[in-house]
């Protein structure tokens, strides 16, 4: 069974094996603000999940990632259900996430009830990539 707990400073070595995009300062903010989670099975960390507030008022999942050996076993779904329930408990009525249109994650989110609500093209910028698709789920 999946255990989901808030990120702590002691989790940094494991966290950095799965999330190479978070700066030192942002990692510390995730710990302080309780906006990061470590996902474990049998007390062994297997994944990470983090979020921000879009427009300072809407939870926006910025990363969920499992070790490859634990992907496809339902842990991502369990983690998302946990996070969505946590956001409901905090009084939010909607959550958001995004994924590149060429990634498989969109199919995962669609199965969980997320709906595409637009996108952004970052061509000719320092962040050039395929279109980023925004998805929402209303409670």
Image (cartoon, helix red, strand yellow):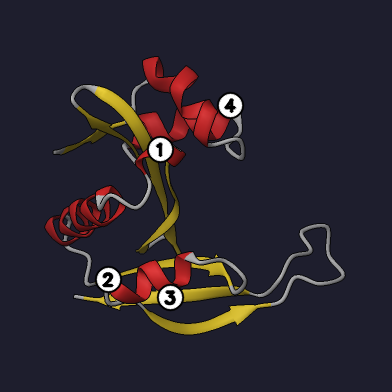
Residue 125 percent across, percent down from the top left: 83, 65
Q: CA distance from mark 3 to mark 4?
A: 28 Å
Dot 2: within a 10 Å radius of its alpha carbon, few (fewer than 14), some, or many (20 or more) residues? few
Disc on res. 112: 2
User: Considering only order in the chain, which callout, 4 or 3, is on the residue closer to the N terminus?
Assistant: 4
Q: CA distance from mark 1 to mark 4?
A: 27 Å
Q: For the C terminus, which image quadrant?
A: bottom left
Q: Which residue is mark 3?
A: 135
Please state the horizontal and vertical placement of residue 105, each as a whole percent of the image.
Answer: 46, 64
* Residue where numbered disc 4 is placed: 24
Q: Position of residue 94 (x, y in %)?
A: 28, 72
- Please give the name of the residue rendered at 26% of the width and 48% of the height, measured from the top-left corner: 75
Q: Secondary structure at mark 2?
A: loop
The one nearer the camera, 51 or 113, is 113
- Residue carrying label 1: 69
- Whether pointer 1 and pointer 4 mark residues with C-beta atoms closer than 8 Å, the reply is no
Q: Is residue 107 left or right of residue 21?
A: left
Residue at mark 4 to residue at mark 2: CA–CA distance: 31 Å
Assign a secondary structure to mark 4: helix
Identified at 37% across, 67% down, the residue is: 108
């Amino acid at each position: 069974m999946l255990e989901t707990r808030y990120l702590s400073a002691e989790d940094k070595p494991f966290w950095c094996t799965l999330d190479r995009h978070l700066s030192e300062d942002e990692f510390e903010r995730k710990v302080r603000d309780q906006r990061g989670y470590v996902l474990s099975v049998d007390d062994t960390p297997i994944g990470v999940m983090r979020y921000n507030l879009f427009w300072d008022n809407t939870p926006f999942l910025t990363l969920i990632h499992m070790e490859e050996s634990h992907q496809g076993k339902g842990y991502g779904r369990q983690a998302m259900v946990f996070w969505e329930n946590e956001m409901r408990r905090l009084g939010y009525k909607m959550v958001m996430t995004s994924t590149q249109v060429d990634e498989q994650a969109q199919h995962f989110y669609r199965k969980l009830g997320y709906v595409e609500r637009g996108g952004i093209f970052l061509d000719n910028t320092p962040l050039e990539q395929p279109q980023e698709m925004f998805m929402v789920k209303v409670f």
